[in-house]
């Protein structure tokens, strides 16, 4: 099968038949005699339903100046039947024999697009498929070619599968139409009920809408309550972070004060020790001086540790403040969304 110029892949299959037994064994021996050839177009299968409005088949045989067309079907159908036949009378010539033996007889299926409304589309018809018949019409093969050829078992099986799927698709389409009809019937009943209801009395539809509205309001209130709870929780976390920051600051100040006092005491002790060591032998004085230096170094290390503890406490306090601010911002955004 060929694909048309518009890129449609949904091609149709035709049943073509010729004059069974009316073709001589050798047409070449009858040059100059009259030959009647009947072309039958019975049906098409597998057309796209949405493009099959007014489907019909067009073809042109040999030197026929007029394009032949089958009658267009009413509405749309996936497997339309045409039951069309046309007889051509020609004098057997070398050109006719060449055409029958080498050329193809192409059948084009045309249809219009369904716009989806109750009124069928009235735009120009477009080709939606092509089927070509070709073969050696000279001798015994002519009858088989004119009859459309004998389908192989594999082709027959494939055709049966295609037809089965088409039947399933038609059944599904029919069920869909039934569901659509039910829906339209229910809508009509609802409109009639609303029209017949006294003014001011709620209908079933109004009651359903009121129920939906109440449900939405309840969900909105629940969402607001969740946002409030999250905001309160963020506030508590922010307060806890503030208290922790204050405690960290106090601990840092106390550590710094203890380090300062320890440094002063150690310095005084070192001075007193140095004064006492002045009257001792030089060796004892050096040992005492070394000890004092160690104590002074330890005091300095204690001061450094205290300052590090203070810095760590300040960092922890800053982190807590940032976390509290982020929680507050998240609560504000949530409230804004709701």
Image: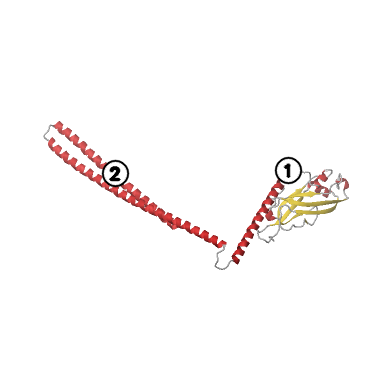
| Residue 65 in picture, x, y percent from top left | 80, 56
- The C terminus, quarter of image: bottom left
Given contact means CB atoms under 8 Å apart, are the residues at marks 1 and 2 in contact?
A: no
Give the spatial CA distance, label 1 vs label 2: 88 Å
Q: How many marks?
A: 2
Q: Nearer the viewer, mark 1 or mark 2?
A: 1
For label 2, the SS is helix
The furthest residue to the bottom: 199
Residue 73: x and y in percent read 74, 57
Classify mark 2: residues with Cα within 10 Å, few (<14), some (14-19) or many (20+).
Answer: some
The answer to whether any part of residue 276 appears in the image is yes
* Residue ranking furthest to the left: 279
Disc 1 crowd, CA 10 A, few/some/many (<14, 14-19, 20+) = few
Q: Is residue 86 left or right of residue 46?
A: right
Q: Residue at x 81, y 51 (%)?
A: 39
Residue 275, picture quadrant: top left
Mark identifier at residue 241: none
Residue located 25% across and 46% down the image: 254
Kind of element beneath mark 1: helix
Q: State which tag comes first along the sequence, 1 or 2.
A: 1
Residue 338 appears in view: no
> Is 138 left, or right, of 130 in this rendering?
right
Number of the label disc, if any, that sits on residue 309: 2
Q: Is residue 180 above or below residue 200?
A: above
**Which residue is pictured at 63% across the width and 58% down the height?**
183
Colouring convention used in this rendered image of the protein: secondary structure
Q: Nearer the viewer, residue 72 or 198?
A: 198
**Residue 157 circle label:** 1
Q: Using residue 244 as the reference point, say whether residue 73 is left or right of it.
A: right
């Amino acid at each position: 099968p060929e694909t048309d110029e518009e890129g449609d892949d949904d091609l149709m299959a035709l049943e073509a038949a010729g004059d069974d037994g009316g073709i001589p064994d050798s047409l070449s021996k009858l040059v100059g005699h009259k030959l009647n050839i009947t072309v039958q177009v019975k049906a098409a299968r597998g057309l796209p339903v949405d493009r099959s409005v007014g489907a019909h088949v067009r073809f042109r045989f040999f030197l026929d100046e007029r394009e032949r067309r089958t009658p267009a079907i009413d509405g749309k159908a996936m497997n339309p039947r045409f039951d069309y036949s046309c007889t051509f009378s020609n004098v057997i010539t070398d050109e006719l024999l060449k055409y029958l033996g080498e050329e193809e007889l192409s059948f084009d299926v045309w249809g219009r697009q369904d716009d989806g409304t109750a009124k069928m589309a009235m735009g120009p018809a477009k080709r939606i498929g092509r089927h070509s018949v070709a073969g050696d019409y000279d001798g015994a093969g002519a009858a088989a070619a004119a009859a459309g050829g004998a389908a192989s078992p594999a082709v027959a099986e494939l055709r049966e599968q295609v037809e089965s799927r088409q039947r399933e698709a038609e059944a599904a389409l029919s069920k869909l139409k039934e569901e659509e009809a039910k829906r339209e019937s229910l809508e009509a009943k609802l409109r009639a009920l609303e029209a017949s209801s006294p003014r001011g009395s709620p209908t079933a539809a109004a009651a359903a809408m009121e129920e939906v509205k109440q449900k939405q309001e309840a969900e909105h209130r629940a969402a607001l309550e969740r946002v409030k709870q999250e905001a309160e929780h963020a506030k508590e976390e922010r307060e806890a972070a503030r208290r922790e920051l204050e405690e960290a600051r106090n601990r840092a100040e106390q550590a710094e004060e203890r380090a300062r006092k320890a440094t002063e005491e150690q310095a005084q002790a070192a001075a007193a020790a140095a004064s006492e060591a002045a009257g001792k032998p030089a060796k004892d004085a050096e040992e005492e001086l070394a000890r004092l230096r160690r104590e002074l170094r330890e005091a300095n290390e204690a001061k450094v540790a205290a300052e590090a503890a203070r810095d760590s406490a300040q960092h922890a306090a800053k982190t807590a403040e940032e976390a509290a601010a982020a929680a507050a911002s998240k609560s504000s955004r949530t409230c804004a969304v709701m």
